[in-house]
Image (spheres, helix red, strand yellow):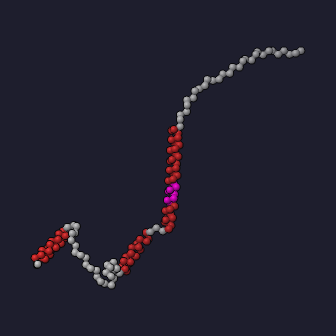
Amino acid sequence: MSAPNAEISQLIQTIEELDEKLTIPIFRPPPAPPPSGGNGGNPHNDPMEPRISALEARLDTLVPNLATKADIAEVRGDIKGWMLSTVLTIIGTMLAAIFGVAQVMKPAPAPSVQQPPIIITVPAAPPAQPVTPEK
């Protein structure tokens, strides 16, 4: 029976050697059972102090760069100003386009036909009679 066990162990060794050479592992030994320590075998139950101190150090470097209420209020005012000017510009551009198109679409005035002048003929006044003084 030693021959089959030797063949199996040699086969496992060959698979492990190929596994190390391949990029995609095909054979992994089963994971070790968790330790039976006081933390229930949870590997993430490390002491919290080093992790918290690292987070506090990181926050101490980030907090000075954060925006304050005054900064946010200033940016809000700037945004409102830009929005108002943008809206007014858009409205002005639209009105100019509408009036421009209206001028282009306006029908051309009909050519005016010049009326002949009206001539009024007045009869000539009768010749004046000499006035004789009464004696």
Q: Is residue 70 above or below residue 89?
A: below
Residue 25 placement, left or right of 103: left
Residue 31 placement, left or right of 63: left
- Quadrant of residue 29 in the image? bottom left
Residue pictured at 53% horizontal, 34% vertical: 108
Q: Position of residue 75 (x, y in %)?
A: 49, 62
* Residues drawn in magenta: 78-85
Q: Position of residue 80 (x, y in %)?
A: 51, 59
The quadrant the N terminus occupies is bottom left
Which residue is outermost to the front? 1
Q: Position of residue 41 (x, y in %)?
A: 31, 81
Q: Is residue 32 magenta?
A: no
Q: Position of residue 48 (x, y in %)?
A: 37, 80
Q: Is residue 26 above or below residue 43?
A: above
The quadrant the C terminus occupies is top right
- Quadrant of residue 63 in the image? bottom left
Q: Is residue 82 magenta?
A: yes
Which residue is outermost to the bottom? 38
